[in-house]
Amino acid sequence: MPRSRPRARAAHRPDLTPPGNPIAAPEDSLAEVIELARLMESKRASRPRLIGPRGETIALPEPVFHLLHRVVSVLARGDAVTVVPVHKELTSQQAADLLNVSRQYLVRLLDQGALPHSKTGKHRRIRINDLLAYKKKREAERQSALDELTQMSQDFGGYSECD
């Protein structure tokens, strides 16, 4: 029987945040992150490059640059970031947290068929791309309802102006 190769494991680095946990810029480096965001916004004359610890350089592919730019922009605002692979499956609690709803409410949505999911034993799993599509649809519906209410308010004279 052929032996399977052991999976390569990353060296344990206590300074790295475990995968899936939000990462925020520490207060003492926020100014540097803001400066980096400003530099990334400026026009680039040449292709961005990374410089390694021994001085070696490598061109930064455009998709990687755009991802880093988005991450740095969020960190510069003082927000935290989590990077999740598109095909990753989330637990019901993780999905609820991403939607900012209770787990019980999310389970009700799953049971009503509002969101595709799979079950592993008793545990529900939701694909991140399905969850993000649902979130986008929900936001569009919410915005449409707000636009409709705004239009109705304008049609009926709006709010009275106070002096």
Image (tube, helix red, strand yellow):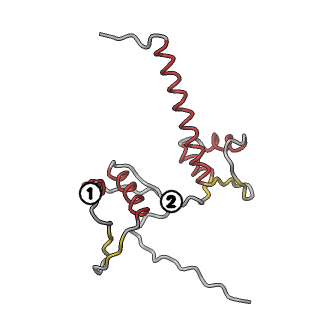
- Residue 46 position by quadrant: bottom left
Q: Which mark is residue 148?
A: none
- Whether residue 44 is situated above or below residue 52 in the rendered picture: above
Work out whether residue 47 or residue 65 is closer to the camera in this orientation and state it: 47
Instruction: In the displayed orientation, state which residue is furthest to the front.
Output: 45
Amino acid carrying label 1: it is Leu
Q: Position of residue 101 (x, y in %)?
A: 56, 41
Is residue 27 visible in the rendered image? The answer is no
The residue identified by callout 2 is 20
- Residue under the point 40% across and 58% down: 66
The C terminus - image quarter: top left
The N terminus - image quarter: bottom right
Q: Secondary structure at mark 2?
A: loop
Is residue 158 visible in the rendered image? The answer is yes
Work out whether residue 44 or residue 126 is closer to the camera in this orientation and state it: 44
Q: Give the class, few, some or many, for how many residues have Cα within 10 Å of label 1's Cα (few <14, many ≥20).
A: few
Left or right for 58, reference 149: left
Work out whether residue 47 or residue 88 is closer to the camera in this orientation and state it: 47
- Residue under the point 59% across and 60% down: 88
Q: Position of residue 21 (x, y in %)?
A: 47, 58
Work out whether residue 17 or residue 139 is closer to the camera in this orientation and state it: 139
Amino acid carrying label 2: it is Gly
- Residue 47 position by quadrant: bottom left
- Whether residue 109 is situated above or below residue 152 in the rendered picture: below
Left or right for 68, reference 102: left
The residue identified by callout 1 is 39
- Residue under the point 63% across and 40% down: 105
Q: Give the class, few, some or many, for how many residues have Cα within 10 Å of label 2's Cα (few <14, many ≥20).
A: few
- Cα–Cα span, label 2 and label 1: 27 Å
